[in-house]
Image (tube, grey):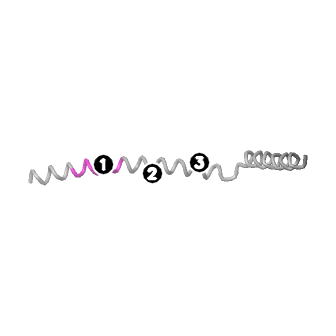
Amino acid sequence: MRIANTESKSMDKLIVKALTLKADRDGVTALEYGIIASILGLVLVGIFTSFGKTLTTLFSSVATSI
């Protein structure tokens, strides 16, 4: 009987802790900004990679024509 009672108390503590964490909103804005910044960084890397290839092609054709 004691084992079931101990498990019940542990489960109650776990549920209270989970509900407390669910209600806690500290750091959510920072996390959102971090996600936005990482997505923006990935997009910029893709754009600059594509732009770099275009510039390489442009300068190669200019060098060839000179």
Secondary structure of residue under mark 3:
helix
The disc placed on residue 62 is: none
- For this rendering, which residue is in front, 20 or 11? 11
Task: Give how far across and how far down residue 57 sits, in percent.
Answer: 20, 49
User: In this figure, which residue is indicated by the disc labeled 1?
Assistant: 51
Task: Give how far across and how far down residue 63 sits, in percent.
Answer: 13, 54
Mark nearer the N terminus (2 vs 3): 3
Single out the residue that lies furthest toward the right.
1
Image point (81%, 46%), residue name: 11
Q: CA distance from mark 1 to mark 3?
A: 28 Å
* For the residues bearing labels 1 and 2, Cβ distance under 8 angstroms: no
Q: CA distance from mark 1 to mark 2?
A: 15 Å
**Amino acid marked by disc 2:** Gly
Image point (90%, 46%), residue name: 1
**Amino acid marked by disc 3:** Glu
For residue 48: magenta?
A: yes
Q: CA distance from mark 2 to mark 3?
A: 14 Å
Task: Give how far across and how far down residue 14 sits, in percent.
Answer: 78, 48
Figure quadrant of the C terminus: bottom left
Mark nearer the N terminus (1 vs 3): 3
In magenta, the rendered stretch is: 47-56
Would residue 4 appear left or right of 27 to someone viewing this image?
right
User: In this figure, which residue is indicated by the disc labeled 3?
Assistant: 32
